[in-house]
Image (cartoon, grey):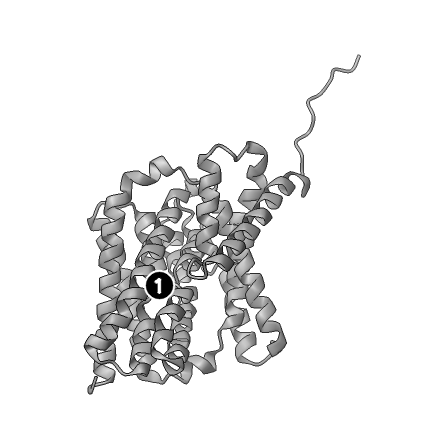
Amino acid sequence: MTLPTAPAPATGIRPLLPGLAVSAAGVAAATGINALLPTVSPLMAAVVLGALMANLGACPAALRPGLAFTSRRLLRLGVVLLGAQLAVRDVLALGLPVVLLVVATVAIAFSGTWWLGRRLGLGRDLSLLVATGFAICGAAAVAAMNGVADGEEEDVMTAIALVTLFGSVCIVAFPLLQGMLRLPAESFGVWSGASVHEVAQVVATAQTAGTAALATAVVVKLTRVVLLAPLIAGVSVLRRRTAGPRTGGKPPIVPLFVAGFLAMVALRSLGALPTAWLAPLKTAETLLFTAALFAMGTAVNLRALTRTGRRAVVLGALSTVLISLVALGGVMVLTPGA
């Protein structure tokens, strides 16, 4: 007599399909919100929609495999495609002084924000994610760094919320400060690109000063994005050194998705990517990041998020002031007549 056996666990792509389908629906909804409210990026809308879905009890266990796949694998593919938007020649065209200003601003903003977060009693991972988002490129940088840090989803949600809040403040405050400081358009572009958090927020801020300011701001902002790769690699090296035998082994020195990012930068810089490919690759990158952040949002517990809310807002305010003042100081040095 043969005893009945338990069914084997499902393998392959089938368990992923429900979560992938819901992620696709989340992307469509976030894209629609962005179309109606252009100041709200699809990344921001996606993470909020995911969090609402989870906290309203609409996220059954059957969705989890696909959502986990989306939040990790598709995120890393999005980071790879991000490299296609960057060309080394555009960075070099800024000139060495501006490039050094960007590097110094990112270094001071990142280290200063991380230090402030720890002094405020926030966790190591939350401090790291906020520092990365504010110093580099907002939500995309937060998500990319979490690929190495593997922090709690509540920390990711908090960091992205802070980027949204204080980046929006910059859109209003920076144009007002330009008039008070009498900054020339190009100098204002450098300041905006070096200190405002999200790419979309940089565009909204700099375009108030004209096309010259906008063009400069975008290139300066993309120069900050280039620094995402060495920053993630550096954090990965530190994690590798401190990884104990019970953590399942040491992480790689350079994560594969960071190597892919650098490869795409090299291809773009060498002219190996046809110009006609750039817009589709940009669209694919945005869709992948939007899907990943929607999936991350579904793991957020809003009650747990409120526990560190006040201290996190203080950190966001201090970090915004820090990066703005450091970048402005550099601009003043480069533009003595401003």
Depth check: 51 or 116 in front? 51
Residue hosting label 1: 197
Above or below for 260 versus 151: below
Identify the element where label 1 is drawn: loop
Q: Position of residue 290 (x, y in %)?
A: 51, 54
Q: Is residue 65 left or right of residue 93?
A: right
Q: Is residue 238 left or right of residue 121?
A: right
Q: Is residue 111 left or right of residue 145?
A: left
Q: Position of residue 46 (x, y in %)?
A: 48, 50
Q: How many marks?
A: 1
Residue lying furthest top: 1
Residue 260 in view (yes/no): no
Residue at 35% x, 50% y is 242
Residue at 26% x, 46% y is 122
Above or below for 295 versus 62: below
Q: Amino acid at mark 1?
A: His
Q: Is residue 135 left or right of residue 69?
A: left
Instruction: Report the quarter where the N terminus lies.
Output: top right
Above or below for 235 versus 20: below
Residue 124 in view (yes/no): yes
Instruction: Give the crowd class for mark 1: few <14, some 14-19, many >=20 residues within 10 Å.
Output: many
Q: Position of residue 69 (x, y in %)?
A: 56, 46
Instruction: Report the quarter where the C terminus lies.
Output: bottom left
Residue lying furthest right: 1
Depth check: 260 or 245 in front? 260
Depth check: 311 or 45 in front? 45
Residue at 35% x, 53% y is 129
Residue at 64% x, 38% y is 15
Above or below for 119 versus 227: above
Quarter occupied by residue 247: top left
